[in-house]
Amino acid sequence: MPELRAELIAAARRMAASGLNRGTAGNLSVRERDGFLITPTGMDYETLTPADVVFMRLDGSHDGRRKPSSEWRFHRDLYAARPEAGAVLHAHSPFAASLACLRREIPPFHYMIARFGGDTVRCAGYATFGTQELSDAALAAMAGRSACLLANHGMLLHGRDLKHALDLGVELEALCEQYWRACQLGEPALLDAEEMRRVLEKFAGYGQQA
């Protein structure tokens, strides 16, 4: 679908404009038919054309003139495991990467943590980029969640579609920055489990409903 390829490129460029990515770091994909479209490895998003976008199947095979992102495995595994995932975003944004390098999960210092499905945003254990071990660690950290940090790496999340995934990426980076800044002044006060349960219930019906 040419329109979806163009939409993917436009969203990838917005990742850089929103501060989530610099250079060729990070990657983005969107579900299509029996697989997904993904950004190619090592290419500047500003230079991409629809023909550069790679179509991948869930068995790991791909079509096109370019190689897929080296991180295609956690994209593939999220689409296979999470039917609600319509798009997957991975970024090396400054504050998410800083917390990931501390291997620190984000605790319930702010109620908006519930936006990602739980009372924390977990940090996945470290594994070499592009490996199945990293994908396995990421999916374990995302159990019951729509996002996680990747140790010594960055952020990973899924959304309903490309716009939703990008919006969530911006929100997660903002929360990482807020937590980082709060930690400079002391130990942030955390919301308790009962309050986070109430917030999660409210988020279940949050926003405009179809």
Image (cartoon, helix red, strand yellow):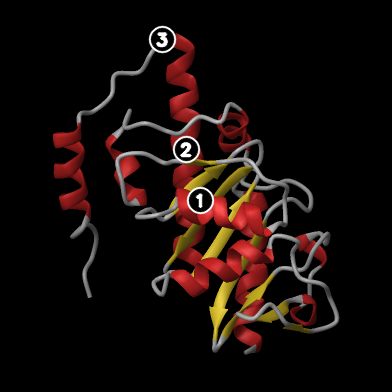
x and y percentages locating residue 36 in the rendered image: 60, 78
Q: Position of residue 117 (x, y in %)?
A: 32, 51
Task: Mark 1 or mark 3: name the one nearer the start of the chain.
Answer: 1
Q: Amino acid at mark 3?
A: Gly
Snapshot quadrant of residue 153: top right
How far from the left and from the top, in percent, is residue 56? 67, 80
Q: In whole angstroms, how far apart are the C-alphas of marks 3 and 2? A: 19 Å
Residue marked by disc 3: 186
**Sequence-first tag of 3 and 2:** 2
Residue linked to disc 1 = 169
Q: As shown in the figure, which amino acid type bears the numbered disc 1?
A: Gly
| Mark 2, residue position | 174
| Label 3: few (<14), some (14–19) or many (≥20) C-alpha neighbours in 10 Å | few
Up-down: is 67 above or below 18? below
Image depth: mark 3 or mark 2 in front = 3
Q: Count neighbours of disc 2 (C-alpha within 10 A) and say few if under 14, some if 14 to 19, many if 20 or more.
A: some
Could you tell me which residue is drawn at 46 percent across and 55 percent down? 167
Residue at left offset 22%, top offset 75%: 210
Residue at the extreme top of the image, as rendered: 186
Kindly indicate whether the residue at mark 3 contacts the one at mark 1 (C-beta within 8 angstroms).
no
